[in-house]
Structure formats: C-alpha cells, structure tokens
Amino acid sequence: MIFWSGSNVHAQTVQDSTINGRPFVVHLVQTQETLYGIAREYNAELNQIVVQNPSVIQGLKVGMKILVPLQKPRTNEEKGVSKIFNVFKKKTKTTNKKPTLIVSDSSIVKAALLLPFYLDMNDTLEVYNVSTKLTSIYHKSKTAIQYYSGVLLALDMLKSLGYNIDIKVIDVPNDSVCMSILDSTILDDRSLIVGPLHANQFKKLANRYGSDSNRKLVSPLSYKNVIKNHENTYQFVPFSNVQIDTIVDLIAKKYSSENLLIIGNEQEMGLLRKFKSSLSLNTNLKYKLYAVSQGLPEKEMMKQKLDESENVVVVASNNRAFVGRVIPMLASMEDTLFTVYGLESWNRFSSLDEIELNLLNVHYPSVFFHDENQLFNEFRDNYHYRFKEYPSKYAFAAYKQFLFLIADGFAGLYNFQKVENQKGWLNTRFPVVFIQDYKQQIIDY
C-alpha cells in the first residue's frame, strides 16, 4: 500500500510528450531530487538533460519542469513504476586504440563541449531546499555556466543561419571524470571538441585525439600552453611572447625619444629577454632596464632609472605580487607622468587599484574585452531577453568563439597562426586596452 501510494504520487509528477518525433518525459522536480537521480530514474543521458534544460546547471528547485529525453517511448509498466538504472557502467579502457571519427551526415556539425559545471555540487546545494527559490551557485561552476550561456546564444544564431549542430555537453569536474570520458567512446564521433578548461585535462584530450587531423580540439580559456605537441589543437588566449610583440609594435608607433624603462624580475627572465629582443628590432627605441634579482622592486632604485618629468614604463611580469608592488610605487611619484604597459594576466589581478591604473594610463592586452559594436550590442540584447541579466566576458567570448569555429562568415573575429616551436594553432588577434576616465577603451592598431 505504501509502495503504491508513492508510485501514484510520482506518476502525477511526470507526463510523456513527443517533440519533433522524439520521446520526452516532462518531469516536475520534487523535494530532495537531484539531476543524477533523475537521469538514473529514466535511464537518460545527463548531458542531454543539460542540453534540453540549460537552467538546471544553476541547480534544481521544487516545482521546476524539465524535459528528459528518452531513447524510446516508455511502456505502460515503465510509466507506472519508477525504475533506477546504473548509467555509470564500467567501460573497457580504449586509450591505446586509435579513435575512428564517425560522421553519418556531413551537413551536421558534431560538437562536444566539456566544462567543469560541478553538477553534483549544485545538486548538493539544492537537495535540502524546500522553497521555490534557488540557492547560491557553487562558486567554481560560475565560469562554466557563463561560458555555456554564451554557447546557447551562438547555437541560436547558427541555427538561424542554416547550420545544423549536434552538441554534447559534458560535465568535467575533475581529472577522474575526464579520464573516464577519454576511456569511453562518447567523443569518438565528434569533429569539434571545445574544452576542457583546465590545461592538464586538455593535454590528456590532445593525447587521446591529437593524431586525428579531421578533428579540431579547442582550448577556449586556458592561459597555459596546450598546443605544443599536436597539429589539430587550437588556443584562443595568446602566449606572453605574442603579446610582447604587439606591445612593442605599439610603443614603436607612438614613441621615439621618450624615456623608456623595462622593469622585471630575474625569476621571469624569459619575459625580459623577449622584450629586449623585440625592442632591439626597433632601432629608434632606446631603453633602460631595471631587473630585480631577488624579492620585490625598491622605490629609490626605480627612481634612479626614471626621468623626472615623463616616462614610458614596460612591466615585464605576470607575477601578481611583483605587479602589485610596482604599480603603487609609480603612482606615488606625483610629479611624474607615466604611460605603463603590462600583460594580459593583469586582467586577473583584482588587487590592482582602479585609481592608480587610471593615473598611470595603463595599457595591456585584454583577450575577453568587448567593444560596443553591433555584434556585441545584438548579443547583449538577446542575452538580457533570455537570461534577464547582463552577460559576462566569458559569455560573450563563448558566443564569438562558436560563431568563428562553425560559420565562415565570422572568420574575421580571430586569426590563428602557427608560432615558433608549436605544432598547434594560436590566436594572434586580440584587443589592447588602455584605462581612461576609469574605463577600459580599445586602442585601434
């Protein structure tokens, strides 16, 4: 009697439906249910539930309706009694087996998106929530959620342009899950694989599929070098060496006789050498060098290298503590005018003071910065209409990246080239911004 009562209550929470010829269950979320539990209950693929219901990434709430795609219509018996299946079956290791790309229809772009959603952690946040309001999102999920939201809008745009895309969205929260995915065949029919975000996981993906020239393996956000060993790998964030060449070109165009100082530390000697090498190609540029051998720079030592009135300063460092020491020192020299150049990593240094950046007229590459142009404005309006919030830099990056990767009409958004000592491809087109009136503005170069 208890079992029948429970089944009867549960039967009221689901409804079978057919959309475009495919069977679905419309599931009404109950207290303490999780995504993994729902996937197991209907023997459904978790990533397909995510694709059909993007909002579930932000956690379940009681009363939410979600579409659960089924492999086949349910029988009357299956509708009457909940069944639990183990979708995490043990897979045979296939690491040494050369993957074969299978594409049944050349008009369909078969893609995969591997992101660290941490769905199990968001499930945990929601499991005891009996209200209709969402709890906070697990903090490590946010970048993946923001990126995925941009992908969704890109897919809408691509569909309107006539592209047919079959995408698998897979949660990759850790190395163990990553290896289980690579040991399976779930990615074998994918011609475009974007992610994982973490460099070590992407390198494992490249080791698995790097010999197949029919695939594109794309690292969307990684700052570390992941394209060294395989020709079918693509990295959107440029190396520091590429950034340095662009910065030196800008300095050479804008300055000739101004006082130029390079500040760096010997722990990052590679950056200092690269700046010196690039500057040596421009004979009009004369510079001084302040290289700190140990610890942090000293103000008096720095002042000895500077002109009293006006200076162009290049800070050759990706080190948060080093940069965080140099910027306040320069800003404290009130009677001297500065134009400071830095690297893309500074975008991640939240400790840098906005007033000091503005005072020093700081310039640096900003790969994920967006200008107020038609592409962004349309994206922003559509994003706000769909998600009721302003898009993050990662959402817009995802939008642009997927348009570029799939539609020829957006080929001008990025420029991938082979660079020295790398087998893969690196994006060399990125904006350089400067801080003026407390806002980032793009330099036209």
Image: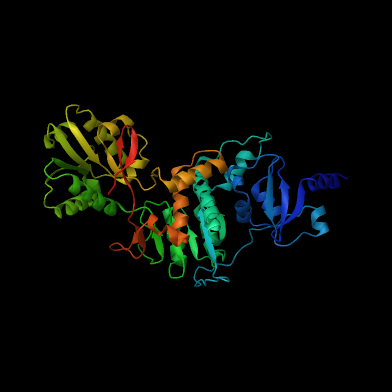
Specify the quadrant of the image occupied by residue 207. Answer: bottom left
Give the side of residue 61 with respect to residue 301, left or right. Answer: right
**Camera-side residue: 269 or 15?**
15
Q: Nearer the viewer, residue 51 or 175?
A: 51
Give the mark count.
Answer: 0
**Residue 82 placed where, x, y %?**
77, 52
Is residue 147 shown to the viewer in this render? yes
Q: In this orientation, which residue lies closer to the viewer: 86 or 161? A: 161
Q: Is residue 387 above or below residue 225?
A: above
Relative horizontal placement of residue 345, taking residue 131 as reference (left or right): left
Asked if one can make out residue 291 in the rendered structure from this viewpoint, the answer is no
Can you name the residue that lies furthest to the right here? 1
Residue 153 spot, x, y in % from top left: 53, 50
x then y, percent, for residue 387: 56, 41
Instruction: Please tell me in which quadrant of the rendered image residue 28 appears.
Output: top right
Residue 107, given in percent of the width and then of the height, sits at: 55, 68
